[in-house]
Image (tube, rainbow, N blue to C red):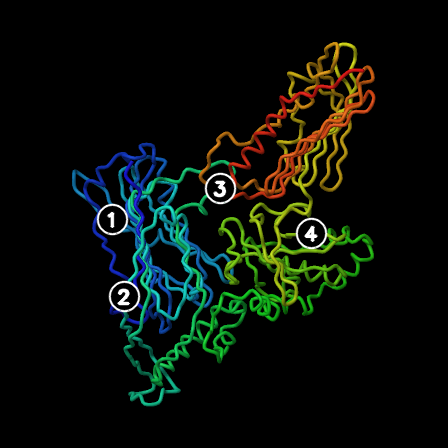
Amino acid sequence: MKKLKFTFVFVFFLFAVQLFGQPQKIHWQKPGIEDLKMTVDQDEPDAPAVILERYADVYFDDWREELRLFYNYRERIKILKPEGAKYTYFRIPYIGYDYFEDFTQIRGSIYRLVNGKMRKKNLGKRYITRKKIDNYNYVLEIRFPDVKVGDIIEIRYTLATFNFVQPRRFYFQEDIPVRHAEFNANIPYFMKYYFDVYRFDAMASKTMQESFAQIEWSARYKDPIPAGLSHRGYNFRATTSLNFPSNYYHLVMEDVPSFVPEKYLDNPKNYYYHVDMKLQQLQRDIGYYNQFTLFLWEKFSNRMYQTTVMGYRPMTKFLAQSRPYPAGFIIFDATSWDLLAKNLEKDPAFGRQLKRYAGVLPVVNRLKKEHKDTLDLAKAIYKWVQDSIKWNGHYDFLVSKNLSKVVKTREGNSADLNMLLVYMLRRAGIKANPVLIRTLDKGHLIKDLAAFYQFNHVIASAYIDNHIVLLDAIGEHPWFILPQKDLNQVGVLVAKDTLFLASINHPILPKKIYSINAIVNNNNQISGQLTYTLTGLYSLDSTLAQPAISTDYASLVPGSVNSNDGIINKTYTIVADNLISQTDTSYIIKPFALFDDIENIFNSYSRNYPVYLGHRWKWTYKVTITLPEKVRQQYLPPVKKSINGATLTLNSEIKRKQVVITLNLDMDRYYFDVNEYEKLYNLLQAFGQMRDASIVIDRT
């Protein structure tokens, strides 16, 4: 396989650009005849397609007479097999509200070999469509029709955006091979970005140089006119040139293999080679006293402030444009959780919504009369919100409209539903707070980056019986589980002007409990009752509906079934052989041999990526056996193995004729880093070996 190459260049450089830096010219030529003739990827013969080239340039420029961040993207894909047809469809979400994001160019082409010559066909406009999801969110869809095996498709687009704080993630890797991937970014010195390059340490080389950039700053103006500038007519365009440093970033990867997922992985795209840009600080420049420069800065900082405050989107266009930029020199800072908490508390689309009239007090009062128990009341409020307000399928941590309008329209985004849930819980006398989270598909939360743009969802927390219970009213799931997308390790609980990191877990811990109570006859056969209990998420899992009892050891006859709000109890009559043998001096018991689910869930000692188990759990196997005769009372020391986040225990108790043996596996975390995998594997290997374990008990 070709050697994987990754280069990173971080350069302060001198480069003549318009505004805040035009893009570096992409070396983009026609595909080669060799690529068109290629029928198989040499490194991965089974690959259905291969990405020949992928480029992205991030830079600043003006569009519609406003400063924008531009994301210039190009990609070519070679189709090698019929299965590669799925790579001919592109779906690109963007925020279309108030032209917050828009495409300045969209192009598509198909290259085909015809009689030994290359033919190019441009993609028709009817195959490029825009769809509105809601008032803020849109989707660009690009479809390549009639693509054949052997074709090369090409997509090009430029996105102009006010999303300065978190530009789009760039992927160097996909589930098909990538020959060449390149990322460039040209950033003004007064904008400080955090660059997160996944798997950078293992393969990166880097150099740094310092220089200056010449930037031409231009804009069109009406009144008021900056002093000292001449003009003709009411509208005019003025230009000035400035010299100051800019930061240029250049990253390249070549011959990137396709991503091979492993079992128990959260979102595979989290582990593709990629780079993220996150704005940490924008500091107002004070080195230039030219009035024209200051005027331009005020215009830019005003827009920057509008598009980085959390309440921007719900505002009307007039209100957004009328918000003044801060008087201080720093107009954006993503380093203070305390500051974020205060902003959230007074934000009209977040904290203030919990203090306004929502029109649901009659409902709350009725539910309070019907439910005296705190947990029952919380469940009733949760059910009312879930049944009464339709989720529109969109995630957000800010409400799209006042909660009173949510109640009237009976529809809203995820924040509308869950902020209304928090509101109603509080009005019912239950301590409740919103919890900001980042769903699994968006990647992991960076705990030391205090920025609101990390979050895309909000759920509710309720303090009930001295415990924090997390609730998410979207969808149709019962109160005792959270949607799988929510389970992304930690969130941020917002309590007045304070933030707390909170573990994201199901309201009821999923438990699987076996309890056997049996007697032994003279033929060493045991018979008795098995109680099989499932709680929380497990109570809804059809794969766990029947106990995992080996037919080689035991037979079961179903008995009663009791189900109650996230708890299922099933009883069986059990008869088992080959679990007990005896000698003249002892009984030999294999208490866990009949349980098929006592095993190591991992089949490999090595692993490349972190482990995501989906949720916490507790598994219990309790076997109580009454022997035909009294045995010597003896102490068997407990067995305990533990790592950070998981514990395995084995306890035995012997009294007269009765032997009680209990095995517990407690998984207190559901995410383990790759450097913790070896310990986790060894713990689960010890758990799996318990199935063959024997306990020797001395006879009297």
Examine the rendering and report whether any part of residue 418 can be seen: yes
Mark 3 or mark 4, which has the lower sequence index? 4
**x, y percent for residue 192:** 41, 66
Please report contact status of discs 4 and 2: CB closer than 8 Å, yes or no. no
Residue identifier under label 4:
469
Which of pointers 4 and 2 lies earlier in the amino acid sequence?
A: 2
Mark 3 or mark 4, whichever is nearer to me: 3
Structural distance between the alpha carbons of marks 4 and 2 = 53 Å
Q: CA distance from mark 1 to mark 3?
A: 46 Å
Determine which residue is flagged by label 1.
Answer: 121
Which percent across, then down, holds residue 293?
A: 35, 81
Of badges 4 and 1, nearer the viewer stands 4
- Placement of the N terminus among the 4 image quadrants: top left
Q: Within 10 Å of the Cα at label 1, are there few (<14), some (14-19), or many (20+) other Cα atoms?
A: few
Of helix, strand and loop, which one carries label 3?
helix
Picture layout, residue 173 above or below residue 641 = below
Which kind of residue does numbered mark 4 sit on? Val
Give amino acid for label 3: Val
Q: Secondary structure at mark 2?
A: loop
Question: In the displayed structure, would residue 283 be above or below residue 490?
Answer: below
Among the two numbered marks 3 and 2 on one chain, the one whose residue lies closer to the N terminus: 2
| Mark 3 to mark 4 CA distance (whole Å) | 29 Å
Q: Position of residue 242 (x, y in %)?
A: 29, 77
Is residue 377 shown left or right of residue 650?
Answer: right
Task: Name the mark on residue 674.
Answer: 3
- Name the residue at 35% across, 47% down: 203
Residue under label 2: 13
From this view, report whether residue 665 is shown above or below residue 672: above
**Residue type beneath disc 2:** Phe
Q: Earlier in the sequence, mark 1 or mark 3?
A: 1
Task: Name the disc covering residue 216, or none.
Answer: none
